[in-house]
Amino acid sequence: MLELLEMLSSQEYHKNVLNALKEQDPQIYKLITREYERLQNTLQLIAAENQCSQAVLAALGSIVQNKTTEGFPGARFHGGCEIVDNIENIAASRARETFGAQYANVQPHSGTSANQIVITAILEKDDTILSLGMDQGGHVSHGANVSFSGKYFKVYNYNVNKDSFLLDYDAIKAMAIAFKPKLIICGATAYSRTIDFKKFREIAERVGAYLLADISHIAGLVIAGAHPSPVNYAHFTTTSTYKPGGPRGGLILMGHDFDRKITVGGKELPLWKLIDKATFPGVQGTPYLNNIAAKAVFFNETLTEQYRARQFKIIENAKRLASNLADMNYDVLTGGTDNHMVLINISNLRDGMTGLIAQQCLEECGIIINMNKLPYDNKNAKVTSGIRLGTPIVTKNGMGHGEIDTISALTDTVLRKVKILSESKYEIDDSTRDEIREKVRQLCSKFPLC
C-alpha cells in the first residue's frame, strides 16, 4: 500500500511539470511549444541530430536532476546516493550489453567531454596525436587548434584521398610511422563510408600508439551491427548519446583492453581505473544524474529488435536519398553512402551555389539540413561548398522509400529555382516557397513525432 501511495505521489509531482512551467514562465513555455511545432511541421535532415523517446524525456525532466554527488557508485563524495548509484549501475550495465563492451563510463557530459577524458587520461602535455583533420571530416575535439586538444598537444592530421574522398590506410600508416603518435583518433563527423577499425588498430600496434574510436555519428548503426564495431579493436571507444537517439551526453567504452595495465607515477593501474580518475576529479565534477537515468532508458531501448531494425532502415533511406540526388546530377561525395549521411558538393550544381544558400533557402521551405565544409573545399567555412543530409529522424517517424523520393524531389525543386545573388544572398519566389512549405507540412502531418 505504501509503495502504491509513493508511486501515485511521484506521478502527481512529475505530471505537473509542464503545467508548472506554463504558469511560472509562459514565455519559455510558449517557445518550447513553438519548437515542438517546428519539429512536427518541417523535415529534419540534419545528420548530427536524432529524436529521443518520451520515456527518455521523462527521465530527463525527473526529480533525479536535483541530486548532487561526485565520484562513482559505491565511492561518492556526498550522502544519499543509494538510489542514484543503482540508476548509474543499471545505465553502465545496459551500455556494456548493447555495445558488447567490458567497461562503460556513463558520466561524460558530451561526446567531446568523453574525448577530453580519454586524452587527459593517457597523454601528457605536448604528446603527439594523429587524427583526421577537421576540414577533412574530423571533429573539433580530435585536435583542432581552437580546441583543448589542439592547444596542449602536438597534432598531425591525416586526409582522405583527394580523388576518391576515401580514407587511405596506407597513407595513414606512413604518417603514423613518421610521427610516432602516442594516440591515434579515428571516427568522423562527415564521412559516408565504412571505417575499418581493424586496420586502424594494426596501424596503432605498428607504432605503439593507443587507438581512440569516436563513433558518435554511427553509434546506433554499430549497436545494430549495421556498421562494424570498434569496441574490441580500439583501446577506447567514445560516443555522444543523442546522435543514436538518446539524451544529451557522452559515453566511454572499452573492450578487451579494459584491464590492460599502465604505469602512472610508478604505480600500475588498469586502463579503466585511469579513465575513472580522469573523469573525476580530472575533468568533471558532479555527473548529470537525470541524464544518466535517461541514458539507462535509452540503452534499454537499443536492446530491442525495433531499435536495431530501424538502424538498417536508416541506411536504406540514406542510400535511396543519395541515389535519387545522384540521378538528378548532384555531386554526391564517394558516389553514395554506407551509413546515415549523404554529403554533396552543392557548388557543382549551379554557378554561384554555396552550402550556406542551400541551407537557408531549404529552411525557408521547411527542409532542414546543414551546410558542411568538404575535404579540399575552396570556399571558407562561413559559406562552404557542401551540404550534409541525414535520415535518422525521418526514419524514426516512419518515413520510407516513397517519402524519401518526395523529399528528394522537393529538395531539388528548391535548389533549382532559387535565384543566386552572391555567395550568401539569394531570392526565392514567394509562391514557390509557400507551395513547397505546404507540401512539406502535409507530408509531416502523416508522420507525427514519436
Image: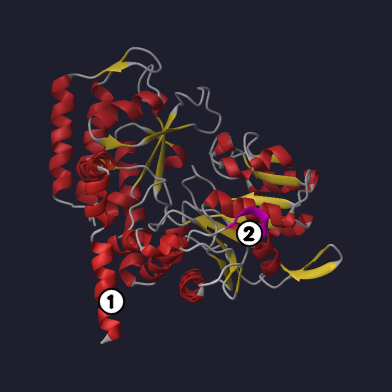
| Residue 440 image offset from top left, x and y in percent | 18, 39
Query: Alpha-carbon neighbours of circle 2 within 10 Å: few (<14), some, or many (≥20)?
Result: many
Q: Is residue 116 magenta?
A: no
* Residue projecting furthest to the right: 266
Q: Quadrant of residue 57?
A: bottom left
Q: Looking at the picture, does residue 421 appear above or below residue 402?
A: above
Q: Looking at the picture, does residue 388 appear above or below residue 378?
A: below
Residue type at numbered disc 1: Met
* Residue projecting furthest to the top: 421
Residue at 22%, 44% in the rendered image: 33
| Residue 132 image offset from top left, x and y in percent | 61, 43
What number is the disc on residue 7?
1
Query: Which one is in front, 269 or 341?
Result: 269
Q: CA distance from mark 1 to mark 2?
A: 34 Å
Residue 234 seen: no
Q: Which residues are magenta?
A: 278-285
Q: Which residue is label 2 attached to?
A: 279
Q: Is residue 283 magenta?
A: yes
Q: How is the image coloured?
A: secondary structure
Q: Looking at the picture, does residue 203 appear above or below residue 430?
A: below
1 or 2: tag closer to the N-terminus: 1
Query: Which one is in front, 364 or 109?
Result: 109
| Residue 213 image offset from top left, x and y in percent | 59, 56
Residue type at numbered disc 2: Thr
Residue at 47%, 41% in the rendered image: 334
